[in-house]
Amino acid sequence: HAREWIAGSSNLFTLSSILDDIANKKPTAADTFNLYFVPIVNIDGYDISWTKGKRLQRKNAKGVDLNRNWPTPFKNAEAVPLWSELYPGKNPGSEPETRGIGAWLHAKNSELAGWVDVHSVKGLILYPYGDTTQPIGNGDDAKFERLGRNVAAATGGGYTGQTAASPPFGPAFGAFDDYLYRTYKKPVLTIEVAGNHFVAHVSTIRTRGTEIFKALTQFAKEVLIFEGNGGEIVFSKEGNGGEIVVSKEGNGGGIAFPKD
């Protein structure tokens, strides 16, 4: 979301920290995985948030909450008005930002092992589902509970793991993480960076960035465990790089998003 500057800066801090560790020959998640970073998805909304009086802009330039614009089998029983901060758009995938990310994910799905969506602020590690309290089944609820708990612990404190349907954000219809899990059946988390306000003080940037760096590093360690491919993952100092393909089969297809 546009106003969540601390999420974007924490993303970039994580990338910088990984590059520093590589330069200093320290083990990183990049030893095991190719890592893709998208610091800001809602770039037009972010630009608007720099305008006087618009610092708390949440939605994109067309007034759509991009994290409610993804396909979901569950519909909000209440009509969401255009002026609402949660307005999901005229239909799922109506926005170019959503369609662009969706098309890229579909093209890359056989290579991707997991995703983290970084937001702010509340200090929460959220996992599916957000649009229903029904269990996922097949043992995946326990896997997500472990994933959320371990990633929260890795931050050093102040973060809590829970389903996205839990207060204060649930229910959330049309969210990115639910779409990803239903479509590709791979681990995904939404991290709400800690804090009490969207306008974070400059003195907190490094602290929040370090927390997210630790969280994303732990997530990378947990991905293969989630998929049942071994025990604790220890990043190698040698690290041969390369892409990790968890499974080429059973990854689902992409959603055909409608055109404008």
Image (tube, rainbow, N blue to C red):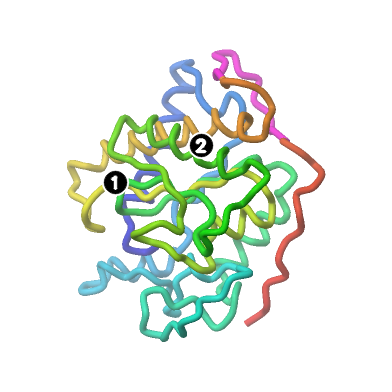
Lateral position of residue 51 relative to residue 61, left or right: left
Q: Residue at x 32, y 55 (%)?
A: 5
Rendered location of residue 37, percent (x, y): 51, 45
Label 2: state its secondary structure.
helix
Residue 65 drawn above or below residue 189: below
Please report the bounds of the magenta region as a residue range.
234-245
Give the camera-side residue of 128 and 224.
128
- Please determine whether, in this image, residue 210 is positioned above or below residue 190: above
Q: Position of residue 206 (x, y in %)?
A: 27, 37
Residue ID for mark 2: 147
Residue at 58 percent of width and 71 percent of height: 74
Residue 238 forms part of the magenta stretch: yes
Q: Disc number at residue 90?
A: none
Q: Residue at x 30, y 53 (%)?
A: 121
Disc number placed over residue 194 in the picture, else none: 1
Query: Image check: 134 left or right of 62?
Result: right
**As drawn, 78 above or below 254:** below
